[in-house]
Image: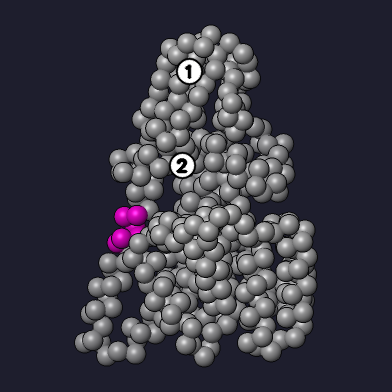
């Protein structure tokens, strides 16, 4: 456990350093706060302690991510007997791109991951507390409806009448409280969804995830972790045929399945004689290598094709520097979220200068008295 604690501390201190120095409070972050009001309360509490700065902005997510990986390690004790196996699963979970991204950006995902892990751990150690937690989650976010839906099927499978009644009750309350609605014109976003899952897991790890989900379906020892991951994943797939879904409503529940993936890999590896394990060793090295390469691309994305996709997380801070070089401390814009992001770094609302952000073109235009005098390619404002 000491080794796990040390590695987690070092890794998340690195993430904190990276987030403070290279990431900006972005338009995407502002939108996340709008969609998950609890984030605003968490951040305001952090600001009250550390002041309104990048450290206070990133610290809550980093701390939650840190405790999530420790909690995941504790959960592996129920599935993996050997300490080195648990350590291996812990490393994979910590290095999964989705876990890194959710810890770094201002988003509800890392909190959903932590609360899901906490529920699973409590369910295995103290069912009463796990039921109390389920009741609390009803009023936190509408995305927990996926958790309740999965638990309904799990309770039917296990013939757990109490959990079934609670899950049905909490699902109904959650859906009513948040006015849950499946709307929009039927339009397929299946490929978009799969592309996002590729990003969250890394491409080849996601392929192994699909294989493990398939294998888990026929596993007679499947438990609550399988049901949570399987049904939330299936729900996201089904809904993607009709509408564009918010991936942070579903993906956090699938990450816990890493423990099953590691379990299936090690079982397949160990049932074979030493002379027949070479293929599995090669597969492990390949998956780990691609995972690390994918993680590296996340941190050094300025030098990859992904820079245009991720520029919104980087450009606000350097944009503010460009504005202040030109003594522009007050600005107006039709984009309220952009204005909030700029205000975080000291550029206040004014009427002399106006800014327009063209997301598709990755360009920002500055106007003075309705005349454009500056245009900036924000993909080149990356702080890396």
143 to the left or right of 199:
right
Asked if the magenta segment contains residue 50, the reply would be: no
Residue beneath the point at 78% across and 65% down: 173
Depth check, front residue: 24 or 311: 311
Label 2 SS: helix
Residue 26 in the image, given as x and y percentages of width and height? 53, 36
* Quarter of the image with the C terminus in it: top left
Which quarter of the picture shows residue 306?
top left
Residue beneath the point at 63% across and 67% down: 146
**In the rendered structure, which disc, 1 or 2, sits on the residue that comes first in sequence?**
2
Mark number, residue 36: none
Residue 34 in the image, given as x and y percentages of width and height? 66, 43
Q: Residue furthest front?
A: 185
Q: From mark 1 to mark 2, how far is it between C-alphas?
A: 29 Å
Q: Is residue 74 above or below residue 42?
A: below
Q: Is residue 28 visible?
A: yes
Q: Is residue 377 above or below residue 151?
A: above
Which residues are drawn in magenta? 289-294
Residue 14 in the image, given as x and y percentages of width and height? 46, 47
Which residue lies under the disc numbered 1? 366
Residue beneath the point at 58% across and 18% down: 331
Which quarter of the picture shows residue 69?
bottom right
Mark 1 is surrounded, within 10 Å at the Cα level, by few (under 14), some (14 to 19) or many (20 or more) other residues, namely many
Q: Main secondary structure of the magenta part?
A: helix
Label 1 SS: strand
Asked if the magenta segment contains residue 291, the reply would be: yes
Residue beneath the point at 56% across and 73% down: 231
- How has the structure been colored for display? one colour
Depth check, front residue: 2 or 121: 121
Mark number, residue 18: 2
Mark 2 is surrounded, within 10 Å at the Cα level, by few (under 14), some (14 to 19) or many (20 or more) other residues, namely some
């Amino acid at each position: 456990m000491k080794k796990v604690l040390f590695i987690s501390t070092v890794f998340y201190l690195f993430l904190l350093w990276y987030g403070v120095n290279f990431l900006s409070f972005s338009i995407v972050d502002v939108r996340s706060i709008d969609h998950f009001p609890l984030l605003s309360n968490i951040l305001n509490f952090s600001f009250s302690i550390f002041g309104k700065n990048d450290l206070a902005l990133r610290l809550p997510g980093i701390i939650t991510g840190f405790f999530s990986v420790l909690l995941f390690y504790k959960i592996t004790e129920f599935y993996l007997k050997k300490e080195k196996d648990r350590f291996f699963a812990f490393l994979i979970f910590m290095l999964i791109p989705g876990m890194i991204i959710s810890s770094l950006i201002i988003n509800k995902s890392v909190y959903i991951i932590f609360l899901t892990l906490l529920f699973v751990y409590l369910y295995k150690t103290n069912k009463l507390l796990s039921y109390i937690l389920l009741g609390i989650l009803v009023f936190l976010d509408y995305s927990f409806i996926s958790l309740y839906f999965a638990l309904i099927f799990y309770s039917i499978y296990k013939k757990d009448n109490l959990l079934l009644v609670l899950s049905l009750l909490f699902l109904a309350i959650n859906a009513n409280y948040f006015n849950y609605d499946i709307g929009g014109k039927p339009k397929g976003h299946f490929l978009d969804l799969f592309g996002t899952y590729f990003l969250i897991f890394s491409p080849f790890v996601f392929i192994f995830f699909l294989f493990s989900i398939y294998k888990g379906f026929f596993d007679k020892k499947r438990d609550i972790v399988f049901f949570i991951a399987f049904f939330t994943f299936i729900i996201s797939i089904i809904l993607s045929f009709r509408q564009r879904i918010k991936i942070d409503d579903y993906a956090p529940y699938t990450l816990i399945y890493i423990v099953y993936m590691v379990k299936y890999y090690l079982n397949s590896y160990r049932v074979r004689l030493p002379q027949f394990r070479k293929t599995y060793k090669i597969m492990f090295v390949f998956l780990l290598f691609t995972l690390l390469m994918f993680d590296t691309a996340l941190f050094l994305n300025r030098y990859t094709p992904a820079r245009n996709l991720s520029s919104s997380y980087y450009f606000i801070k350097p944009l503010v520097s460009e504005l202040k070089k030109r003594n522009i401390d007050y600005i107006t814009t039709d984009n309220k979220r952009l204005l909030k992001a700029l205000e975080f770094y000291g550029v206040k609302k004014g009427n002399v200068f106006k800014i327009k952000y063209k997301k598709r073109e990755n360009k920002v235009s500055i106007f003075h008295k309705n005349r454009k005098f500056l245009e900036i390619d924000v993909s080149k404002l990356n702080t890396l």
